[in-house]
Image (cartoon, rainbow, N blue to C red):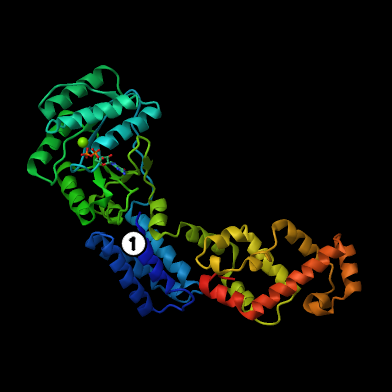
Amino acid sequence: MLDNLKERLRNTFAKLQGKRLTASYVEEVLREVRVALLEADVHYKVASSFIKNVKELATGEKILASLTPYQQIIDIVYQEFVKVMGETAVELAPVKGKLTVFEIVGLQGSGKTTHTAKLAHHFQSAGFKVLTVSVDVYRPAAIEQLKILCNNNGLENFDHSGSKPVKIAKKAYDHAKKNGYDILIIDTAGRLHIDDAMMKEALAIKKTAESNEIILVVDSMAGQDAANVAREFNELLNITGSILTKLDSDTRGGAALSVRAISDAPLLFAGTGEHIADMEVFHPDRMAQRILGMGDVLSLVEKAKDAIDEEQAQKQMEKILSARFDFNDYLEQMKQINKMGSLESILEMMPGFSQMSKQMKSQIPSEKDLKHIEAMILSMTPEERSTPSMINHNRRKRIAAGSGNSIIDVNRFIKNFDKTKKMMKKGNMKKMMKNINLPF
Ligand SMILES: Nc1nc2c(ncn2[C@@H]2O[C@H](COP(=O)(O)OP(=O)(O)O)[C@@H](O)[C@H]2O)c(=O)[nH]1
Ligand SMILES: [Mg+2]
């Protein structure tokens, strides 16, 4: 899902790599982000305010002077995505022993009936006594659909043969009250388009059944329309939350970004399939990560931020690329890398990783190896550390004995060090660093 938006943003951000930012450059990039949002069917008002907010943050002096603009801008955009979708996950919190009524509203085909059953399953699994009822009298098959879904999944459905939605809702409500249900979920009828009759009916049910939650079901494939649906339903019914459905399909994603901003009610759940359990609590941060297609890169940015001081990183980088790289640097370098966790797992998250040769990967020591390497380096004299070429056979024997390693270990380590150095000199490392812009 969201593949187009993901791809557009990725391409846009790729241009930032390794560049010093200027305010006008940021603007150029943000223009592209705006187009990407609009193409993903994000409502134009939402897109505009999104860009405005990002611009304010991204053109601050500190960011512009930063050595890692790529990470910084992505981080700002990411934070803005999270904000637009509501910051933190909001969960419905019905109380046992007291009837809470959910009224499910939305256009026809958006997934109301399916999600009525999913919600019932969700709360019943959490120990609530849940009753469902369909008041979609216009399509008898719809009432049957909910009944079957409930039967198949061990859920309770209020059986009726009524023809007046408000009356059915009232009966179901009385029944639920009398029989000690914690939750009543009312699946209402939808239309292909928003119309007066549908809205009036939903409002009348709200009054009769004292609906505590008005939950709007939105098809995430609805694109720009999703924003209009959210606005109109909200104006009349004052929705308290929404469910975005069909996020498993090839959606452009705009709905996810527009609905919350327009209705100002939290996105509660994401529908991710046709099966009863295919519904997740909506997490704005995780969704932002999916949209950016860079969840992994973002956590990488976090790691890099924690582990590495920018200025020191720049110095290290310069040294690696010069011929002066010695054992002291090597040890420092490997320690830094190790602080970030397994290097392999970090690199795997990055676009440039596949370009790194197998041979190169094999040069990266594990944490255990590092301990041995550290011992070996500490057993060297300062001259040896800074002039690796002077370490002859006798010196190697001494280093082995002093560090508790075998001569074979020492030989292998020095050979690896030479290889790594050669590779860096050849410019492989430089190329790699340029591609991935890792700050060390
Ligand atoms: N793939 C997928 N299909 C869904 C999802 N939610 C609903 N559907 C399908 O969408 C169609 C319409 O759903 P339904 O619940 O009948 O919509 P309603 O008219 O609003 O009650 C059905 O075929 C559902 O199986 C979802 O999250 N993912
Ligand atoms: Mg239905």
Is residue 226 visible to us here?
yes
Q: Is mark 1 within 8 Å of ligand 1?
A: no
**Image location (x, y in percent) of residue 399:** 87, 67
Say left or right for 224 vs 389. left
Is residue 340 visible to us here?
no
Asked if residue 154 is positioned above or below residue 203 in the image, the reply reads: above
In front of the other: 223 or 286: 223
Other-residue count near label 1 (Cα within 10 Å), few / some / many at <14 / 14–19 / ≥20: some
According to the image, label 1 marks what residue?
A: 4
In front of the other: 292 or 314: 292
Quadrant of residue 294 in the image?
Answer: bottom left
Residue lying at 42% horizontally and 68% vertically, measured from the top left: 73
**Tally of marks:** 1
Quadrant of residue 177 in the image?
Answer: top left
Q: For the residue marked with disc 1, what is the amino acid?
A: Asn
Q: Quadrant of ligand 2?
A: top left
User: In which quadrant will I find the N terminus?
Assistant: bottom left
* Outermost residue, front side: 358
* Outermost residue, left side: 197
Say left or right for 409 vs 232. right
Residue lying at 23% horizontally and 50% vertically, measured from the top left: 263
**Image location (x, y in percent) of residue 119:** 32, 34
* Outermost residue, top side: 178
Task: Please tell me whether mark 1 sits on a helix, a strand or a loop.
Answer: helix
User: In which quadrant will I find the C terminus?
Assistant: bottom right
Residue lying at 8% horizontally and 43% vertically, measured from the top left: 196
Asked if residue 153 is positioned above or below residue 348 in the image, the reply reads: above
**Image location (x, y in percent) of residue 70:** 46, 70
**Image location (x, y in percent) of residue 235:** 16, 47
In front of the other: 215 or 432: 432
